[in-house]
Image (cartoon, grey):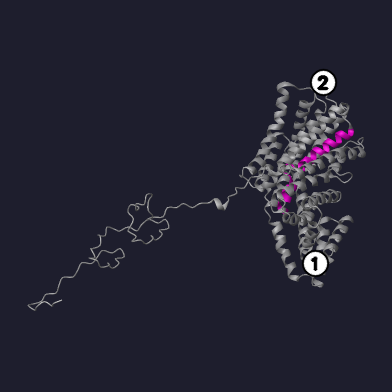
Amino acid sequence: MFEYGPMPPMMFGAMIVFLLLGFPVAFSLAAVGMLFGVLGVVFDHFSPALLNALPLRFYGTISNDLLLAIPFFTFMGAILERCGLAEDLLEGSGQLFGPVPGGLAYAVVIVGAVLGAITGTVAASVIAMGVVSLPVMMRYGYDMRLATGVIAASGTITQVIPPSLVLIILADQLGRSVGDMYAGAIGPSLLQIALFLGFIFVVSRLQPHRMPPLPPEARTKSGRELLWQVAKGMVPSLALIFLVLGTMFMGLATPTEAGAMGSVGAILLAALHGRLSWSLTRQAMAMTMRLTAMVVFILIGSTVFSLVFQGMDGGHWIEYLLSHIPGGVVGFLIFVNIFIFFIAFFLDFFEIAFIIVPLLAPVADSLGIDLVWFGVLLCVNMQTAFMHPPFGFALFYLRGIAPPNVKTSDIYLGAIPWLGLQLILVLVLILWPQSVTYFLKKEAVVDPSTIQLNVPMPGMPAPGGAPAPGAAPSFGQPAAPSFGQPAAPSFGAPAPAPSFGQSAAPSFGQPASPAPAPAPSFGAPATQP
């Protein structure tokens, strides 16, 4: 416990105490960090120069282009929440599935998945679904706990299905690309939708009175009219999904650029539905400003806390504790998921991502765990924070828009079966990691031992032992390597004169000089050799 001194556990405990007392998270983290920063300098635990890194870390946080995607996706979700798209989708899907038991519940889950893929925020999905579908379910005799549970659960799909804000933040904290996190979340999001639909199917068969089909008088549309209504709501949604996610998966846009295009697409959809107004835009901008400011302040506070905590050897302390858990990797995963599940009662997913995940990531990496898979697993676990009675935010949102005759106890008890389904998905991901890694791009692996370099050198003998055509005689010496360059041109120089057994002087590419004429003798006898 105290292998690295008393400071790391004291600092971690002080943070928990501040959070339980109800102080704002951003200021609690910054206050604990600065307090223990002073103690660390006074007791000579680390050099004061460590705190000089704070301004640079603040600048790195503010200038992070990846986090710019958060306000874009938040603005997109806020616009779509108020533009009438959810009403069109639910109206058409409810009519389409209405004749079968549980038809409205099927429609809520499917529309919740579509809204999750184009909004990225739980609040937008839960509020839109609750306002439209809850009165209809109550009117046609749905069990109250089942109706509230399926609405809250359909909104939490947004946490896992791209373009989730949680996946963006986890990618930043884990040092992985957002595209990989989104690709890894495809399998779990499809599995979660299948689990929800399967649960509805089982309940509708065993207890059909809890989710009766729509009566014939309520099914006012059929045939082409019904198909047109479904297409009118679904086609623009699918187009926006491709604009945001398709461009990212194809490598045509970064997450920030995809978020910007999604915001423009949301404005166009609102205009097509005749809902675009200055009031709607102003409300969306105000919501975006509040959420972005909250994220930035939490980031700054967590930066102060994490820098001082690392200076106190807190990272080594956490790694030592978690790496000595019995069971190795399996024991680590069990402990982490139980810890995240219970701490989600008290902390929001932003706070967990900024405070807890940076402490867990180095340990997971040292154990050889794929961080993309680990991040998606944590995201699936953290979505239970929205369904925890009595602190789940999805339950708060639903309570805020539900009629007064809906009991709070029905909302809380109705969430428990869906919370169990989310925990089943966590277990499935641990036992079947390929559900995440299957959609990731496989990196080409080359075995160095299989590489052969067969490059013919100039002047080497051709097959059969004959010298290469045009090659100079080597006199038994190996030819000098040409490094792939062609032979130097001769510029038309004549062949060298015969040497008569004497070695010729090197010509360096110049033509041989003619021999000089003998000098005149003027009658003198020639000198004998």
Q: Secondary structure at mark 1?
A: helix
Instruction: Choose the circle earlier in sequence order: 2 or 1.
Output: 1
Residue at the extreme bottom: 524
Identify the residue position indicated by label 2 in the image: 216
- Front-lying residue, 76 or 281: 76
Q: Answer with left or right where residue 160 lies relative to residue 449.
A: right
Residue at the extreme front: 464
Find residue 449 and report its horizontal and vertical position in percent: 56, 52
Q: Secondary structure at mark 2?
A: helix
Callout 2 amino acid: Pro
Identify the residue position indicated by label 1 in the image: 37
Residue 354 drawn above or below residue 512:
above
Q: Quadrant of residue 418?
A: top right
Q: Answer with left or right where residue 190 lies relative to residue 489.
A: right
Residue 374 drawn above or below residue 139:
below
Query: Residue at the location (84% across, 60% down)?
Result: 12
Q: Is residue 166 visible?
A: yes
Task: Name the image quarter holding the C terminus.
Answer: bottom left
Callout 1 amino acid: Gly
Task: Name the image quarter holding the N terminus.
Answer: bottom right
Q: Quadrant of residue 298?
A: bottom right
Find residue 94 and report its horizontal and vertical position in percent: 78, 28
Find residue 130 and report its horizontal and vertical position in percent: 83, 36
Find residue 457 and report its horizontal and vertical position in percent: 41, 55
Magenta highlight range: 144-173
